[in-house]
Image (cartoon, rainbow, N blue to C red):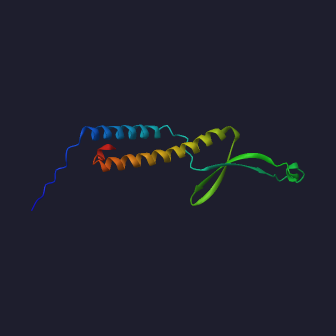
Amino acid sequence: MLYICYAPSMNQSQRVKIKALRGERQKLLQELSSLSLLIRGSFFQRFSTCSRPNCSCHKGEKHGPRAYVAVTQEKAQKQHYIPKQQVNAVQKGILQYHRLLEIVLRVTVINLELMRLKALEEADR
């Protein structure tokens, strides 16, 4: 026996909601292209001592602060020195990475809502 199931037609409010969700998703995906400085890491500063035995850094006046970014690569954390003129760009890149995560989460929520409304399609790519 063959059963045919007809979904009730979408009402106007559902169509409006679907259009709004797709529009929001499109804006978020467009924003991704502006995140060109992405850095997945942690910013920190530290003071250090040098190898000169008579330097004042060995008496408490350490060099620094010097900026670093810690990044996990190949299953190990690596620390990269950040030149002074690059500190702002690196900090912005870290913020952009956090924004990327926010966008991914929001697009996921939108797609789940579209799925619930039976409006998530492969053509949405």
Q: Nearer the viewer, residue 10 or 74?
A: 10
Res 74 → quadrant: bottom right
On the picture, is 106 further left or further right than 8? right
Q: Nearer the viewer, residue 49 or 108?
A: 108
State the image coordinates of residue 93 (x, y, percent, origin top left): 58, 42
Q: Nearer the viewer, residue 7 or 122?
A: 7
Question: Taking 96 as reference, is 60 above or below it?
Answer: below
Q: How many labels does the image show?
A: 0
State the image coordinates of residue 18 (x, y, percent, origin top left): 31, 41
State the image coordinates of residue 57 (x, y, percent, origin top left): 85, 50
Res 29 → quadrant: top left
Q: Which residue lies furthest to the right in this view?
A: 54
* Point 85% across, 48% down: residue: 61
Question: Taking 124 as reference, is 59 above or below it?
Answer: below
Res 75 → quadrant: bottom right
In the picture, which quadrant includes the C terminus? top left
* Point 35% across, 48% down: residue: 113
In the picture, which quadrant includes the N terminus? bottom left
* Point 59% across, 56% down: residue: 72
Q: Residue furthest left?
A: 1
* Point 54% across, 46% down: residue: 98
State the image coordinates of residue 117 (x, y, percent, origin top left): 29, 47
